Image (cartoon, rainbow, N blue to C red):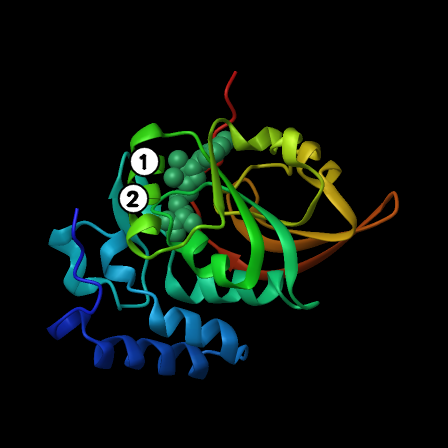
């Protein structure tokens, strides 16, 4: 499959630059994150019929009842993930369209990403191939168990929200590692949980709205 990586009209570089300026105004400070988002064509990660809306700061449907995350949230989570400097090994739970994975890829040595819906995972792989991203490993599975085989991770990012944070995820962090995760019952909050030996330190951030993290029986 060939993708129009450059874009035209509503997917052109000028439209993308406007989104980046807006994210900056909304308080995203990490210029390295903004630059990677400026260069990454979000429009190839959404359905062709919605491509003209891909540089609006909004979540969009990607089929199977799932959504591609809002650019502000992708920027915010990436910024929080990288706050203590570059990372070697990062686990992502909920590949979805693969857009967040693509934004992470240049910042870390190896991204491990887990998705439970097979066609979404296949499409994400194809897009990463088209962008020449080669440091991503994929697993079709329930990611609430983490990915034990490759643990521990320097950081874990979840892009679907559990009601309660699965202990497996914090257990798979290195000492000093951080988990970035939306969670909650009726309302969801984005939290960063840092592991300090056996202690977990939680810092709460924005209120958010993610699709649920589905736990297989
Ligand atoms: N970062 C993605 C967000 C996709 S939405 C993007 O920007 O496109 C969240 C994704 O998490 C969905 O694709 C959903 O299928 C997946 N998901 C939900 N529960 C999961 C689980 N237990 N394990 C793995 N993936 C899960």
Q: Specify the farthest residue to the top.
A: 217
Residue 96, position in %: x, y? 37, 43
- In the shown orientation, is residue 21 left or right of residue 195? left
Q: Say which of 158 and 114 sits in front.
A: 114
Q: Residue at x 35, y 71 (%)?
A: 39
Residue underneath mark 2: 126
Q: Are marks 1 and 2 in contact (CB under 8 Å)?
A: yes
Asked whether 26 or 99 is in front, the reply is 99
Query: Could you say whether the residue bearing mark 1 is in a helix, strand or loop?
Result: helix
- Mark yes or no: residue 211 visible: no
Task: In the rendered view, tell whether residue 23 sits above or below residue 214.
Answer: below
Ligand 1: give its quadrant: top left
With 215 as the anchor, is 16 left or right in this view? left
> Which residue position is annotated with label 1?
122
Label 2: how many residues lie within 10 Å, few (<14), some (14-19) or many (20+)? some
Residue at 49 percent across and 71 percent down: it is 33
């Amino acid at each position: 499959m060939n993708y129009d990586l450059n874009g035209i009209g509503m997917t052109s570089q000028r439209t993308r630059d406007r989104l980046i300026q807006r994210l900056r105004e909304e308080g995203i400070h990490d210029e390295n994150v903004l630059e990677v988002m400026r260069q990454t064509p979000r429009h190839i990660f959404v359905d062709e019929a919605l491509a003209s809306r891909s540089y609006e700061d909004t979540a969009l449907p990607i089929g199977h009842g799932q959504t591609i995350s809002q650019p502000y949230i992708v920027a915010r989570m990436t910024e929080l993930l990288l706050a203590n400097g570059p990372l070697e090994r990062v686990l992502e739970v909920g590949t979805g369209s693969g857009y967040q994975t693509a934004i992470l890829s240049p910042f870390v040595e190896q991204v491990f990403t887990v998705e439970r819906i097979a066609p979404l995972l296949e499409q994400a792989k194809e897009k990463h191939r088209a962008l020449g991203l080669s440091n991503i490993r994929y697993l079709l599975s329930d990611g609430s168990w983490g990915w034990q085989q490759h643990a521990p991770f320097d950081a874990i990012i979840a892009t679907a929200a559990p009601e309660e944070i699965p202990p497996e995820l914090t257990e798979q962090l290195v000492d000093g590692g951080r988990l970035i995760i939306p969670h909650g019952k009726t309302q969801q909050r984005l939290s960063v949980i840092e592991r300090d030996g056996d202690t977990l330190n939680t810092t709460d951030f924005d209120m958010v709205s993610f699709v649920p993290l589905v736990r297989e029986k």
